[in-house]
Every structure is written in C-alpha cells, then in structure tokens.
C-alpha cells in the first residue's frame, strides 16, 4: 500500500473554497479505487496550512489513477475550481508506506 500525503499552503480567507475543493477530491479519489483519509483544515494556530492523505493498493494503482484522472472531466473541473478561486498557493506531495496495526 502507498499513501500520498499532501501539505497545502492555502489562502486564509478562502478556506471555504478550499474545503469545497477537498470534498470534490474525496469523492474523485474513491471513484478511482483509492481510499481517501480526509482533509485537515486550519482551526487554531497557523491559518494557511492544510493537509490531506489518501491511499492506493500500490504505486502502479496510484499511477493508473493519475493517468485516468488527467482525462476525467470531473477532475478537470475540480482543478479549474482551485485555479479560478486561487485558494491554493502551493502544495507538497510525499509518498509514504503506512503501518496500521500494532503488536
């Protein structure tokens, strides 16, 4: 399993727009076979950092999602929404191997 962990720098006064964007992607990732673990939005403290993570069974499954999502009209619309609202300044993407079970 591979987990994509995202750190976003967002525009503080556009948190509702970013939340809408995130809700779109939760549905989209799951449509393509991934498991979305949700978004973490600013509450107290730094008001311009948000996080998200989602998992796929393998890196090849993630790559298939990336290829298919690049051609999907709903995915294109979600990206266009973020660009139009300018709610995201930048983001970082890291791939991690999750451990879900204890001893």
Image (cartoon, helix red, strand yellow):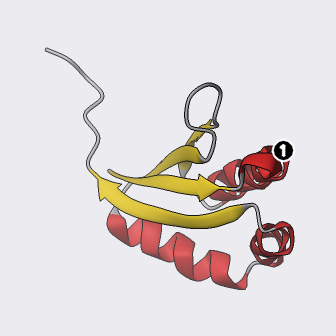
Q: Is residue 38 left or right of residue 18?
A: left
Q: Quadrant of residue 11?
A: bottom right
Q: Is residue 74 above or below residue 33?
A: below
Q: Secondary structure at mark 1?
A: helix
Q: Is residue 87 above or below residue 64?
A: above
Q: Quadrant of residue 33?
A: bottom right
Q: Is residue 46 left or right of residue 83?
A: left
Q: Position of residue 72 (x, y in %)?
A: 75, 78
Q: Residue at x 57, y 56 (%)?
A: 9
Q: Position of residue 76 (x, y in %)?
A: 78, 78
The residue that mark 1 highlights is 16
Q: Residue at x 42, y 63 (%)?
A: 93
Q: Residue at x 44, y 75 (%)?
A: 63
Q: Is residue 65 left or right of residue 101?
A: right
Q: Is residue 102 left or right of residue 45?
A: left
Residue extending furthest left?
103
Quadrant assignment for the C terminus: top left
Q: Quadrant of residue 40?
A: top right
Q: Is residue 89 visible?
A: yes
Q: Position of residue 7 (x, y in %)?
A: 48, 53
Bin the neighbour count of mark 1 within 10 Å (Cα to Cα): few under 14, some 14-19, many 20 and up: few
Q: Is residue 42 above or below residue 91?
A: above
Q: Is residue 23 visible?
A: no
Q: Nearer the viewer, residue 83 or 32?
A: 83
């Amino acid at each position: 399993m591979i987990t994509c962990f995202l750190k976003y720098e967002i525009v503080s006064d556009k948190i509702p727009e970013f939340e809408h964007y995130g809700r779109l992607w939760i549905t989209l990732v799951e449509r393509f076979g991934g498991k979305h673990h949700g978004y973490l939005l600013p509450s107290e403290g730094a008001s311009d950092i948000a996080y998200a993570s989602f998992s796929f069974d393998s890196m090849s499954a993630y790559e298939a999602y990336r290829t298919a999502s690049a051609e999907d009209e709903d995915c294109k619309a979600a990206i266009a929404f973020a660009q139009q609202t300018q709610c995201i300044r930048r983001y970082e993407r890291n791939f991690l191997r999750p451990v879900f079970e204890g001893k």
